[in-house]
């Protein structure tokens, strides 16, 4: 049997066996809820370029790319060569290394809002430390964030990440809703939840809490909000109002560094006070980064005594990650970003054409190298609009399975993220499979 003829889930016996084994030692069989789908996830064995191969030997085009982190796909040679060289010399050490300086220099050169950088191990840590930095710099306790946006797993950043309709509150004054059972009420009280792209309502809330507000946390293209982009007037209002009230503007670029050579801040023409980073700056290894002006980043200084924000971490600026990230970022030239963004637009336009040909309602959303296919045809402008899409979960699951069984690996939410090894050929092949799957629904 050709391994690519193996059907999921009926014939994916090795993945199923691993899942049964995992259930005995891991809650729901994994350490990361985003990799789970029913009846069981496939287990990866190897990856090369834009391809990933599972333990049953099935090869697929990888459009998840570790949720956007693998911008050059799996095991790019230049990155692997840099890592291999580093492995012969040093893997971890309780000292700084030159590689940390080199990656920081590159980020400072590219990002308008970044003069200094601190490294961590995940986007969650980057957001957490940015919030702590804002509090220390302003000596204020509260932050503001947008309803329905994802910023990792820090208590304050998780508030109203995925609220139920019963928890919403008024549209122009969203309630602070817990994201997990037992989340402390004190956490909720220190987070002001903003409506997305509603300029007057959001500004009113910021002014109301001005004396307590340390920072405003924004993602320019929220992944969990069907990639509804930030409106230009909303972004300007956030930047202007934070300056007016003495709060810091925190731009979460963990995803949106993919926008272009200078990140979303360069593309959109805004200079944040703090930038949180992750994913693509690690070259496929665990990473996080916090960047900002020299003045704001001085809260981490330790050479003058006790820092305003203590920041340690056994694997912060790990030399293997640093050399991988540096090589990966060097490969991200303006031409590389143009290639990625062109592929993203080809995918979005192609998906719209597939929906039209198949006679299906739906929409293809996204920007730059991000794309999302939704079978929900109504306008999506903010988190609350997504509730109507729930009735299409079963149809999307069928389409997801069809793609899995026809050489395309994407998320159950039908998210497609481009990588530099991809060409028009991979996009067009995928569109053919999508059209076939839509016609079969």
Image (cartoon, rainbow, N blue to C red):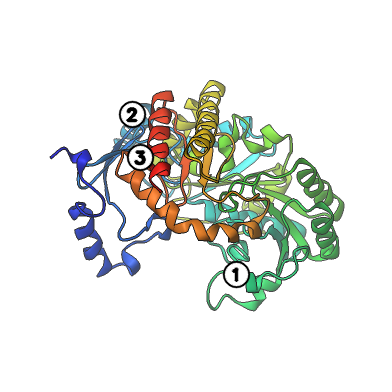
Question: What residue is rendered at 51% in x and 39% in y?
Answer: 355
Picture mark count: 3
Q: Secondary structure at mark 3?
A: strand
Q: Is residue 90 above or below residue 78?
A: below
Image location of residue 218, percent across then percent down: 68, 51
Q: Residue 302, percent across and down? A: 62, 53
**Mark 2 or mark 1, which has the lower sequence index?**
2
Q: CA distance from mark 2 to mark 1?
A: 47 Å
> Residue at the spot x=72%, y=43% of the render?
272
Marks 2 and 3: in contact by CB < 8 Å? Answer: no
Foreground residue among 81 and 409: 409
Q: Earlier in the sequence, mark 1 or mark 3?
A: 1
| Distance between mark 1 and mark 3 Cα atoms | 32 Å
Tell me which corner region of the image, top left, top right, bottom left or bottom right, holds residue 436.
Answer: top left
- 3 relative to 436 in the view: left or right: left
Q: Is residue 65 visible?
A: no
Within-10-Å neighbours for mark 1: few <14, some 14–19, many 20+: few
Q: Is residue 153 visible?
A: yes
Residue 143 in the image, given as x and y percentages of width and height = 71, 61
Q: Nearer the viewer, mark 3 or mark 2?
A: 3
Residue indicated by mark 2: 81
What residue is rendered at 34% in x and 67% in y? 28
Query: Which of 440/35 is in front?
Result: 440
Task: Determine crowd level at label 2: few under 14, some 14-19, many 20+ residues with C-alpha closer than 10 A.
Answer: some
Q: Which residue is mark 1?
A: 164
Q: Secondary structure at mark 1?
A: loop
Q: Secondary structure at mark 2?
A: helix
User: What residue is disc 3 on?
Assistant: 408
For this orientation, the residue located farthest to the top is: 335
Mark sitting earlier along the chain (3/2): 2
The answer to the question of whether label 1 and label 3 lie on touching residues, with beta carbons closer than 8 A, is no
């Amino acid at each position: 049997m050709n391994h690519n003829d193996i059907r999921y889930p009926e014939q994916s016996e090795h993945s199923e066996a691993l899942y049964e084994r995992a259930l005995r030692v891991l809650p729901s069989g994994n350490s990361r809820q985003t990799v789970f789908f029913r009846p069981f996830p496939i287990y990866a064995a190897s990856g090369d370029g834009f391809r990933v191969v599972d333990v049953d030997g099935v090869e697929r085009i990888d459009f998840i790319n570790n949720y956007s982190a693998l911008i050059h796909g799996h095991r790019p040679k230049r990155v692997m060569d840099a890592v291999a060289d580093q492995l012969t010399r040093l893997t971890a050490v309780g000292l700084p290394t030159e590689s940390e300086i080199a990656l920081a220099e590159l980020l400072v050169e590219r990002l308008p809002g970044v003069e200094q950088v601190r490294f961590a191990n995940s986007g969650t840590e980057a957001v957490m430390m940015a919030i702590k930095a804002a509090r220390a710099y302003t000596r204020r306790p509260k932050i503001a964030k947008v309803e329905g946006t994802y910023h990792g797993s820090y208590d304050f950043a998780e508030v109203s990440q995925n609220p139920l309709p019963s928890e919403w509150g008024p549209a122009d004054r969203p309630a602070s809703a817990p994201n997990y059972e037992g989340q402390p009420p004190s956490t909720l009280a220190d987070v002001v939840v903003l409506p997305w792209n509603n300029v007057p309502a959001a500004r009113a809330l910021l002014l109301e809490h001005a004396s307590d507000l340390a920072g405003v946390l924004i993602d320019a293209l929220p992944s969990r909000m069907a990639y509804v982009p930030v409106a230009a007037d909303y972004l300007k209002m956030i930047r202007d109002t934070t300056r007016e009230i003495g709060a810091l503007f925190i731009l979460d670029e963990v995803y949106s560094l993919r926008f272009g050579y200078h990140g979303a801040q360069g593309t959109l023409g805004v200079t944040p006070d703090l930038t949180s980073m992750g994913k693509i700056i690690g070259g496929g290894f665990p990473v996080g980064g916090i960047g900002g002006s020299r003045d704001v980043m001085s809260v981490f200084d330790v050479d003058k005594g006790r820092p305003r924000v203590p920041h340690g971490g056994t694997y912060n600026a790990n030399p293997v990650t640093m050399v991988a990230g540096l090589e990966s970022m060097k490969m991200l030239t303006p031409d590389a970003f143009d290639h990625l963004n062109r592929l993203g637009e080809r995918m979005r336009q192609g998906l719209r054409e597939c929906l039209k040909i198949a006679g299906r309602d739906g929409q293809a959303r996204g920007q730059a190298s991000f794309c999302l296919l939704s079978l929900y045809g109504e306008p999506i402008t903010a988190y609350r609009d997504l509730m109507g899409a729930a009735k299409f979960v079963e149809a999307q699951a069928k389409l997801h399975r069809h793609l899995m069984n026809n050489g395309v690996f994407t998320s159950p939410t039908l998210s497609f993220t481009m990588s530099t090894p991809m060409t028009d050929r991979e996009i067009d092949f995928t569109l053919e499979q999508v059209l076939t799957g839509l016609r079969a629904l």
